[in-house]
Image (cartoon, rainbow, N blue to C red):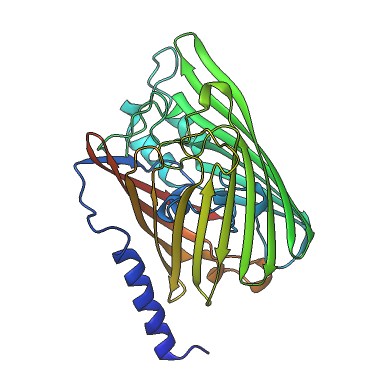
Amino acid sequence: MTAPGGTWARLAIAIALVGAASPELVAQQNHFVTISTLRCRTLAMGGASAAVRDDLGALAMNPAAVQLYAVAKSFRMSFFVNPVAPVVSLSRRQDLKDASGNTDVAPAAFAATLLKGVGVTISALDVLLSWGEETPGFGPRQHGPEAFQMRDYFEAFSNSLAARVRLAPQVALGAGVDLWQLRTGGGRLWQVGFSYGVLVQPDPRVSVGLVYVELPDSFVYARQLLERIRDESLNLGLCWRPFAGTLLSADLRNIGEEGDPLTRELHVGAEQVVLRHFALRSGMYREKDSKRFTYSAGLGLLDLNVFVPAEQQFAHATFAVNYALVYRATATGPDRWHLLSALFRL
């Protein structure tokens, strides 16, 4: 049983983490990524997630960090439902059209976006598939000041498949394949990228992650704006859990490319869970090339583990609603990025 003083101490730490995320969270320009994204937790923590265990959220950062159930399963399937995109597709029909200009495509968009991902667990193996992932600031879809709109949503997105195998209680290996899609003047361009990772846990409270990311030729800059990930980059992550509900993380980007302007760029982040159903997050990094700082903060609401039996719970908190705010300084002034996801697992 947790002492009341301990709960209030964790609450104070959590408030301090978000309060310290930035000395000035006021921006001139707002961008919204709110339809279908898995990057809320990662970007709220400054992108420092290469060693942080997660479910669908780990697909982009390190396939070896993918982990589903806390109790071993001989076979189990999981489904992840996204209610946001289907509702928007029906309420904002004017935003949608197919390649021929037909605007009566809302029912098809509803069906295509309702199920965000599927997971399969077989003993020590986890396999996850996700589709329709938005990439902030890339492609013809412009993330502007309107929070919920689907214009050009189907013009640029990615689909991911990752497999993670636990070789020992302290070691896991993972591999992922990403199918990127972009509509161009000549039709649709499809290209494939890969990622390979390892996660080592030398202590129950410490994990170390290493991941290599290979992006396709036409998408080499797709993940640079907020995630700061380049093609053929090797990224190192460290995660420390000093107390129950407290997580501190750090990533080094592009540790293997001496000539890259993003070489050894440090990202740091923190997460504090309060009263089981609230997670407060913050992070920051300094862009190696521009010398400007980026600050982030965010929160998670409603841990879905509470509503299922212990044997069906995930190995980590699974928050149904996640929000991230990324404050980024640019040459033309500050930008503020808002990311929102609502995801329920069945």
Q: Could you say which quadrant of the image residue 152 lies in?
A: top left
Q: Position of residue 18 (x, y in %)?
A: 33, 64
In the picture, the quarter occupied by the C terminus is bottom right
Q: Position of residue 307 (x, y in %)?
A: 54, 69
Q: Is residue 314 visible?
A: no
In this picture, is 220 found above or below 315?
above
Q: Could you say which quadrant of the image residue 13 lies in?
A: bottom left
In this picture, is 332 found above or below 24?
above
Q: Is residue 149 left or right of residue 270?
A: left
Going 55% across and 37% down the picture, which residue do you hit? 258
User: Of residues 236 and 274, which is closer to you in this image?
Assistant: 236
Q: Position of residue 129 (x, y in %)?
A: 64, 42
Residue furthest out toward the front:
258
Q: Is residue 303 left or right of residue 286?
A: right
Q: Position of residue 211 (x, y in %)?
A: 63, 46
Going 31% across and 26% down the picture, which residue do you hit? 94
Going 34% across and 78% down the picture, which residue do you hit? 12
User: Of residues 255 and 215, which is closer to you in this image?
Assistant: 255
Q: Is residue 72 left or right of residue 204?
A: right
User: Of residues 88 and 62, which is closer to you in this image?
Assistant: 62
Residue furthest out toward the top:
186
In this picture, is 114 found above or below 243?
above
